Image (cartoon, rainbow, N blue to C red):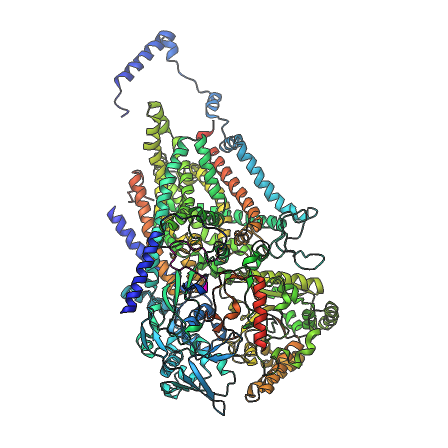
Amino acid sequence: MLKYLAKRLGRSFITLLIILTIVFVLMRQMPIEGYFPNYDKMTKEQIQNGLEIMGMDKPMPVQVLNFLRDLFFKGDLGTSRLYRNNVPVTEVLAPKLPVSIKLGSLALIVALLVGIPMGTLMAKYKGKLFDHIGTGFIVFIQAVPAAVYYLFIQLYGTELLGIKLIFDINDWRSWILPVFSMSLGNIAYYAMWLRRYMVDESNKDYVQLAKIKGVSKNKIMFQHVFRNAFVPMAQYIPTSFLNTVVGSIYIESLYSIPGMGGLLVDVVKKQDNNMVQGIVLVFACVGVVGLIFGDLLMVLLDPRISFASKGGSR
Amino acid sequence: MKKLLAVVLCLAMALSLVACSGTPKESVQPTQSAGGDVAPGEVETPAPADSGEPMVYTDLYVSEVTTLNYLIASQQWDQAAAANVIDSLVENDPYGNIIPGLAETWENSEDGLKWTFHLRQGVKWYDYQGNEVAEVTAQDFVDALRYVMTAENESLTYSQTACVKNAEAFYNKEITDFNEVGVKALDTYTVEYTLEQPTPYFLSGLTYTPWFPAYGPLLEELKKDFGTSNDKLYYCGAYILSEYEPQGHHRYIKNVNNWDADKIYIDEIYRMYNAEAGTLGPNMVLRGEIDYSDISTDIVDDWKANNPEYLSKKRLDSMWSYFYCFNFNPTYDAAYKPEDWLKAVNNENFRHSIMSAFDRAYSIRAHEPDDPESIMQSTITPAAFCSDGTTDFAALPVFQDNSDLFFNKDKALEYKTAAMEELSAQGVTFPIQVVITYKSGDSDWENECILVKQHLEGVLGTDYINCELWAGPSENFLSETRRAGKYSFMRCNWGADYIDPQTWTDPFDGKDNLDPDTGICIGNSYNRMDAILYDEAKIAAYPETAATLKAYYDKVNEAKAEVLDMAKRYQLFAEAEDILIEHALVIPYYISPSTYVATKINVFEGQYSPSGVSTNRFKGQKVEDHFITMDEFTQNFEAWQAAMNK
Amino acid sequence: MGLIKHPKLEQIEQDCTRNLKAALGDNEAFSFAQFNEQEVERTGFSDYSYWGSTLRAFCKNKVALFLVFVVLAILCFTFIQPYLPGQFDAFVVNNNPDTGIPLRNQQPDSVHWLGTNSIGQDLWSRLWQGTRTSLLIGIAVAGIEALVGISIGVLWGYVRKLDFVFTELYNILDNIPSTIVLILVSYILKPGVSTIIIAMSLTGWIGMARFIRNQIIIIRDREYNLASRCLGTPVYRIILRNLLPYLVSVVMLRMALSIPAAIGSEVFLTYIGLGLPATIPSLGNLINEGRTLMMSPNLRYQLIYPTIILSIVTISFYVVGNAFSDAADPKNHR
């Protein structure tokens, strides 16, 4: 197991290098104009000077090597250009990351706390009233575009709570609506898939056997069906955390929460290369670790699954 | 130390107020009470000006500043922040006149090359907490300009200062001694600029940020870090940026020690970031949370019907002029027949047929739904932009006979017949494909293009032209479209760099714009018309166009050389511009519309100028206790015009 | 476990033998069975057909059946609508006949059934044009995603040697921000329906592949697969016969959901400014246009109708997907 982990971590490092290199090269395919907001009124010398300072006048392989050298030997991600001119990337990200993590984890906790019981109960009372109400909720969340119901929640929620329309970091109540809005999608997601897996699971032979043997319905549901159904879900939890953080673009822009949501889109559009690389690095690290963590969770929960190759592997 | 204590106390108060914010309060009323409803937790309390309480102005902003370093920043919102915290040598009054700022007096030498400014004494630099740092001296202007002209600092606005003697040589490192550059501190309070050539409009350019002063020792210390946050620059303007939280909020506090403090009425400006300000702003105005919001054209009708007491307009701003260009060097996909377009666009009858068929008032409705004529222009240089002392440039006699060039259905059809005959003889197949390009995501522009297409095709017939709407990318739009020559007929715009008609000839000057591979001039980055003059084959193919263009560029050069007799200079520029319009090379269109807003500020009290950053200054403006209505706006407008004409 | 007989079981066996012998006598009880081909056919034959039963089970769900009909009706109507009498062209700006000024933001009335937008285009025809565009995008993207995603996902999950390659490939592709790809695509290709399909498929299949891979990993080492492997069944046959049928129900649900998901992500792309231009109506840009007007209660009609259509389409696919997924489980074929 440990050997497997070590191997995977080692490979992940190489993966990271490849990701960063690809992103680095892709970003440099963007038009020159994007680096100079004042392009129309700039002289040729000014533009050339700007490119030289960014190191973009050198051949691509040299640029890549310089970037990787600075990153791994100096820990330097460079400075932002068009997002916050000349401010180190790390300094820009430092205050934003905690805000997003706080928002994302709160939303995820709420989603798990509500979504899992909901899915379980829906599966248990399949075809009964609770199942129908739950399905109704899931269908609504799936069907109405988030962009629309977020806005409604903000508009009427703030009036209901008697708070300001946009986020105020000093008022704890202004966390309620963003967290609530953000968790809705995940609640529906967890409830829906858990119900699906549990229904599939409860049709299996071992469940029938347990029923015949007279095991109590609750015991079957929670000890056997739930545990087995949760295995495929578990793997998504780490990545869904990441998705919640990145996917908060609507919420963060609506409430002006100074987090990471939408930051990537913003800096890609602004062609702030160093910022893009910095964020990609952060996300890729979390993503790679999340994938390993998700696989581990699956192995831990289901002893039948194994990753260590045995003899006779294909 | 006392000040520090005061700040600490203020902060403590703010915090304690914030702590109270958890307590429940009555629901926010959607109506605006006299003093402005303010939720608890707000430090500020807007109040009528006479009550002695601080006057606070709150609004939303969409674009976060990239940098507070005004010496390098080029974006409007960056410069707007600087305009309020740094004073310039000269300023503008609300009527567009240049008035003393940090310079009390100034003089220009006989030959027009030397400008000497005598500074106000006792103006101080303050840090973001309001502590006095040093005095503003002539050397600060020299140091600031040196910073701008140092290539390593990557000032995006350097080219605006390139008129200073040896600036370009210093930027390109041809000379290394800054003393050779034409800016000197003659003594503590006298600064002198020496220019490359006489520049009659020099003063009007000084309200742009690269000319602003900066405290030399701080520049020396911070170098590229200057202005990366609010504690990394010193303030000498009307306000001090006391809080700066990117993507959060900005808080500007009145600089009570400013030399012009009597005219600074708003005590505090609190600006909150919101990426969806366009959608949320109007609602927040109704809830009384902010004092200003743009009201976009698509909801104006609704607001007129339901919230007229909140609705007024912005002051008309002749800084940006919009005009339609014909592309004389198209490079787009062969599927749209650029070869045929090239032949057509070099046919004057064809150009006139488009110009006559173009009902500008109809398509301007996409931007100004009610009164399109109010922003429509018949010259590229906007009306009321500059005058030779007696006559407004756009009203010079040379333009008088142009009115019959514009929308006229019958004439359009006459031109069409003539053009079809001539072009068919040249082997052009009809309909001609007209690629109209706009920026995706800009809904007003998109709507405008839909209207233009429908109207042109309606008047001229689809047997003649077929308009193809092409949405360019929302990022790097211009380099993918206009600059790359990927359009045939497109709305272009240009903003004034200084107050002189010369600034409106700059977009059409493309002699330095060379193809990187062949070294042949590809023409200016607007309509690329000068490309024809550098290609013998094209001169032979389109002698008519070549002759017109030659006449235009000769006239422009003649006008540029005339720097002493302003009346003559303006006349020559007018004649040049008239060539563009008369031969339908460029179709004048409109100036930035006076869009609808909900605001508590009388917009006519602010500084006014068609160039520079003066219009962004809050100095001189007051927050009223109510939102301005259309009636009040009209009254204020009339009062403003009357005062201006006096 | 099978070797040690339970004492009770042994007793039952003995009882049975005794009873049989008593009833039939020695000869009858132990006569040799003759090979009878007909008999073999009879026991080997079953009129059970998987897809037939699935369809039958599906048809029992009347709501789902109705919604299939609804989606088909919407799809057909989007093609028929322009040819119906009294329709406006979705692209034409309608002017007030008296003043020649565009009819902006007209409330729904008898002429413009759903009103007009902010430059006076008929929203009824734009809605159907938009629905057509969006459904087309959704189906195309979901189809490409399923095809590429399933093929790669199965290989990734089943073939252990490829797990390494694909996992790393996934890590790489998944971490390259799709915004970069989308923006670069927008520089190369002209904005339009095909561009957006390409752009969305370029990044969309990754999620599907990973989903399938996880499902495969869960079942690949189950006993019946081990048995197949021991019997020397070729890999392709294990995949096609053992693994995929097992996954039909989850895969179907996932596919049914990926159509509305693709439509939803078109809404998102429009929101971040990378969607279709408004000259090509789609549910995405109709909803985004309506969204900006949401704060004005009188103009909400511009938002509500596209949202309703989007919701109907999504709900239909969701319910149909779930019903089909239930029906595809052989355990429910009774």
**Res. B261 visible in picture:** yes
Q: Residue furthest front?
A: B51
Residue C176 horizontal/vertical position (percent): 40, 57
Say if the magenta span includes residue A99: no
Q: Which residues are magenta?
A: B33-49
Residue B127 horizontal/vertical position (percent): 33, 71
Q: Is residue C303 above or below residue B229?
A: above
Tell me if B160 is positioned left or right of A221 in this view. right
Q: Residue furthest left?
A: A2
Q: Nearer the viewer, residue C110 or C141?
A: C110
Residue A161 horizontal/vertical position (percent): 42, 47
Image quarter (top left, top right, bottom left or bottom right) of the N terminus of chain B:
bottom left
Residue B227 horizontal/vertical position (percent): 36, 71
Q: Nearer the viewer, residue A142 or B408?
A: B408
Image quarter (top left, top right, bottom left or bottom right) of the C terminus of chain B:
bottom right
Say if the magenta span includes residue B36: yes
**Res. A287 visible in picture:** no
Q: Is residue B374 above or below residue C121?
A: below
Tell me if B523 is positioned left or right of A296 in this view. right
Q: Is residue C136 above or below residue B351?
A: above
Magenta part mainly helix, strand or loop?
A: loop
